[in-house]
Image (cartoon, rainbow, N blue to C red):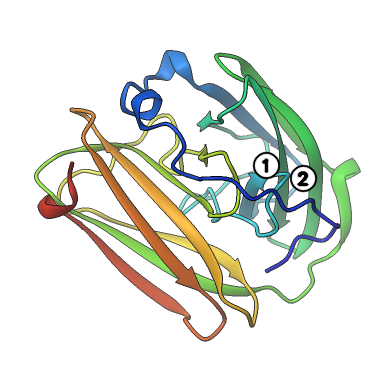
Amino acid sequence: MSKFRLMLLVFGIFLANFANVFGLGPQELSRVTFVNETGNTIKYLFASASEAQEWGPDLLGDKEFIYGDNLTYFVHHEDDCALFDFYAIDSLDNAYIIQSVKLCQKGDAVMVVTVSDFVARKRHVQISRVFLTNATNSSLQYVFFAPSKTRHWGFDILRSDMSLEPGATIEYAVPVGTKNSQFDILAIAKDRTLIQHNLELSASKPAVYIDFTVEDLH
């Protein structure tokens, strides 16, 4: 699904610097805490780099983001600072958009979603659901999932207090359109081994299932 404003499409190599990613740790990431001050429960929270044309997956997964609550995520980006956009939908189908938020490496930010960010009642959003299963014998500490045509890995969808244990499955909603959109996934195990996947999503694919296997680790 295209974003609601004109975006500059930057062609770059998504898997830009494996040496840096391999050494990834919390001290090398931005950390963003979202606070829900909308007065309602938020049921979707989409995010992606401002340079991307598609929204990334819903960061909430199966988590309810109730009024007054806060959630913290790690963010990875290639530059010292990068701009990100956010799109939230609450339980009454009110939509909120926050654009061009600057996030900087090794920094903490607080994003308060309020009624002042309200833009409209939700437009019809087509969703593809992506099911990720850890079929390895290693705990996955980070899972980055973002549109392919951006230089930034963006948000770790596991949240700062989560890991994906062997045998576990997580489900994420991704806004899609009638045309195919490309997404990349980078999973990082506790021992810093990596798993990469590319997937193509569209409205014709309401559900996609991906197993992270031992053979994928490298």
Q: Residue at x 56, y 38 (%)?
A: 152
Mark 2 lies on a secondary structure that is: loop
Number of residue marks:
2
Q: Where is residue 36 drawn, in percent x and y?
A: 69, 38
Please tell me which residue lies in front, 116 or 52.
Answer: 52
Q: Amino acid at mark 2?
A: Gly
Quadrant including the C terminus: top left
Q: Amino acid at mark 1?
A: Tyr
Quadrant including the N terminus: bottom right
In the picture of the structure, the residue carrying the numbered disc 2 is 39
Whether label 2 touches label 1, CB < 8 Å: yes
Q: Is residue 173 above or below residue 52?
A: below
Question: Residue 49 is drawn in which quadrant?
Answer: top right
Mark 1 lies on a secondary structure that is: loop
Q: Residue at x 53, y 55 (%)?
A: 148
Question: Residue 109 is drawn in which quadrant?
Answer: top right
Q: CA distance from mark 2 to mark 1?
A: 5 Å
Q: Residue at x 32, y 43 (%)?
A: 187
| Label number found at residue 49 | none
User: Considering only order in the chain, which callout, 1 or 2, is on the residue closer to the N terminus?
Assistant: 2
Q: Is residue 150 above or below residue 188?
A: below
Q: Where is residue 56 drawn, in percent x and y?
A: 58, 54
Q: Where is residue 212 drawn, in percent x and y?
A: 22, 55
Q: Where is residue 125 drawn, in percent x and y?
A: 69, 73
Q: Residue at x 77, y 45 (%)?
A: 39
Please tell me which residue lies in front, 17 or 126.
Answer: 17
| Label number found at residue 67 | 1
